[in-house]
Image (tube, rainbow, N blue to C red):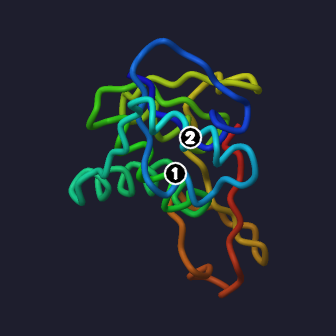
Amino acid sequence: MYVLDSSAFIHDFHTTEQTATVPLVREELEGETVYRYDAMEGAGMHVHIPNDDTIETVRRAARESGDLEVLSETDVRLIAAGFELDGRLVTDDYAMQNVAEKMNVDVEVIARDGIDEQRHWLFQCQGCGREFDERKDRCPICGSELARKNPS
């Protein structure tokens, strides 16, 4: 089963396999992409609502990887749906790919290249330059804001 992100509707993704998505995806769409969503729903696409425990598991995985700050609620719910349905997540979003890989959810990309490796982001203080493994509101040393930093 393919679990479709909004990019699947934007890029007119086609498959003969079963499809699913979450209700929040429709809210992200506009114009003819809404019609694609409606047509696929009318043709039998499953609209899945993941359970709260799975959503929290996704948030925990995203927090550990450093991707939580850039994921929308829709993104979190799509990853949860992919996990619950044992589906293949169809998305071009790199942060979603990273968390999905962490949760052993297969991913298929559409318009971009997929990720090459899973990343665990670091956070660097914009004032003193110290690095932290976990996201904090402010640097505990100097109080400046932290920015997400590529670990490579």
Q: Which of the pair 148/94 is nearer the observer?
A: 94
Quadrant of the rendered image containing residue 103 = top left
**Circle 2 is placed at which residue position?**
5
Q: Check the picture and name the quadrant holding the N terminus.
A: top left
Task: Residue at 71% x, 83% y: name it.
Answer: 144
Task: Residue at 55% x, 60% y: name it.
Answer: 72
Q: Which of the pair 126/64 is nearer the observer?
A: 64
Give residue 9's position: percent from left, percent from top: 65, 37
**Circle 1 is placed at which residue position?**
75
Label 1 close to label 2 by CB (< 8 Å): yes
Look at the picture and state if 87 lies above or below 50: above
Q: Residues within 10 Å of mark 1 (few under 14, many from 20)?
A: many
Give residue 62's position: percent from left, percent from top: 46, 52
Q: Residue furthest top?
A: 16
Residue 58: which disc? none
Q: Is residue 94 left or right of residue 128?
A: left
Q: What count of labels does the image hold?
A: 2
Q: Residue furthest bottom?
A: 143
Give residue 78's position: percent from left, percent from top: 44, 45
Q: Residues within 10 Å of mark 2 (few under 14, many from 20)?
A: many
Q: Amino acid at mark 1?
A: Asp
Q: Check the picture and name the quadrant holding the C terminus.
A: top right
Q: Is residue 119 left or right of residue 42?
A: right
Task: Residue at 49% x, 62% y: name it.
Answer: 73
Q: Amino acid at mark 2?
A: Asp
Q: Earlier in the sequence, mark 1 or mark 2?
A: 2
> Dot 1: what SS?
helix
